[in-house]
Image (spheres, rainbow, N blue to C red):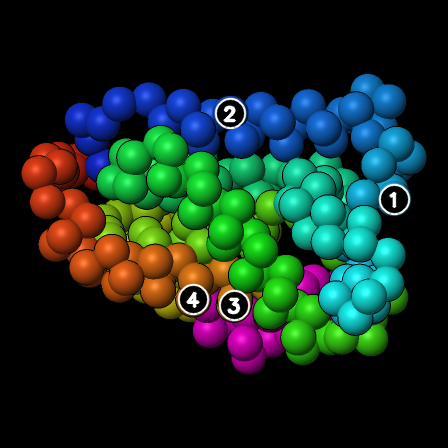
């Protein structure tokens, strides 16, 4: 299911979320020399490979550690980019307002690191490049899952193209279970799992939902359809 929007109202513009989307889109185009459907050619050496990262941690080329960060801003193709950005704008907005822009930016990078570490732990000898914002976005989803479980999300069902509304806990719970139960070729499912769990742990470490949202008025559209 493809998320389109949620029903939360009365919140300021999510500057960090918009900045992350802008960076991802710009780097995607730059990587393809501004041919939107072209192949990545500029930053292929900045993709993370688990085997290289493991070697770096054992005294090998330390540049592989840098790719943990750079790979968060690279995408395989246009659908990969669009899918990730839809999830980020739908769920990042509320999470950024709840955490505050600075903390959200730092946690976003942290969730991406945890996602990369989880994927590398599960696939330590893999030579396949790992790239995409989905691990860090998984952290956003984990936060949203605990902070706003009752919010409504409008989603588009693939191949049906009929928008439907569901609760956030249903959509995100199914998304999380899908990552564990249905491994997909070429998809770093365990990175998604690691990021999601890191997002949930972040909320718990901060004192839980009530502590994070204390003093932050939440207004939702109850006629959301």
Rendering coords of residue 36 (x, y %): 79, 26
Q: Magenta stretch: residue 183 in it? A: yes
Which residue lies under the disc numbered 4? 197
Measured Cα–Cα span from mark 3 to mark 4: 6 Å
Are the residues tagged 3 and 2 within 8 Å (C-beta)?
no
Sequence-first disc among 3 and 2: 2
Which residue lies under the disc numbered 1? 45
Sequence-first disc among 4 and 1: 1
Q: Based on the displayed image, in which of its 4 quarters is residue 146 positioned?
A: bottom left
Measured Cα–Cα span from mark 2 to mark 4: 24 Å
Instruction: Specify start and end residues of the magenta stretch as a single range.
Output: 175-190
Note whether 110 is above or below 34 in the view shown.
Answer: below
Q: Residues within 10 Å of mark 2 (few under 14, many from 20)?
A: few
Rendering coords of residue 19 (x, y %): 51, 25
Which residue lies under the disc numbered 2? 19
- Name the disc covering residue 15, or none: none
Circle 1 SS class: helix
Of the two numbered discs 4 and 1 in the rendering, the one whose residue sits closer to the viewer: 1
Sequence-first disc among 2 and 1: 2
Rendering coords of residue 115 (x, y %): 57, 61
């Amino acid at each position: 299911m493809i998320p389109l929007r949620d029903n939360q109202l009365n919140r300021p513009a999510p500057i960090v979320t918009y900045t992350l989307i802008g960076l991802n889109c710009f780097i995607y185009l730059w990587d393809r020399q501004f041919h939107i459907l072209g192949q990545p050619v500029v930053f292929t050496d900045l993709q993370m490979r688990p085997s290289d990262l493991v070697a770096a941690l054992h005294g090998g080329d330390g540049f592989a550690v840098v790719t943990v960060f750079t790979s968060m801003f690279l995408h395989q193709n246009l659908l990969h980019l669009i899918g990730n950005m839809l999830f980020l704008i739908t769920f990042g907005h509320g999470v950024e307002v709840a955490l505050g822009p600075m903390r959200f930016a730092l946690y976003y990078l942290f969730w991406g690191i945890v996602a990369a570490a989880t994927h590398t732990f599960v696939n330590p000898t893999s030579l396949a490049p790992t790239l995409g914002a989905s691990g860090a976005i998984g952290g956003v989803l984990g936060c949203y899952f605990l902070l706003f479980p009752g919010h409504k999300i409008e989603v588009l069902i693939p191949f049906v193209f009929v928008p439907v509304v569901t609760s956030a806990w249903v959509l995100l719970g199914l998304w999380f279970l899908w990552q564990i139960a249905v491994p997909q070729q070429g998809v770093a499912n365990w990175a998604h799992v690691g990021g999601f769990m890191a997002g949930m742990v972040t909320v718990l470490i901060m004192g839980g939902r009530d502590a994070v949202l204390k003093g932050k008025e939440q207004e939702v559209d109850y006629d959301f359809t």
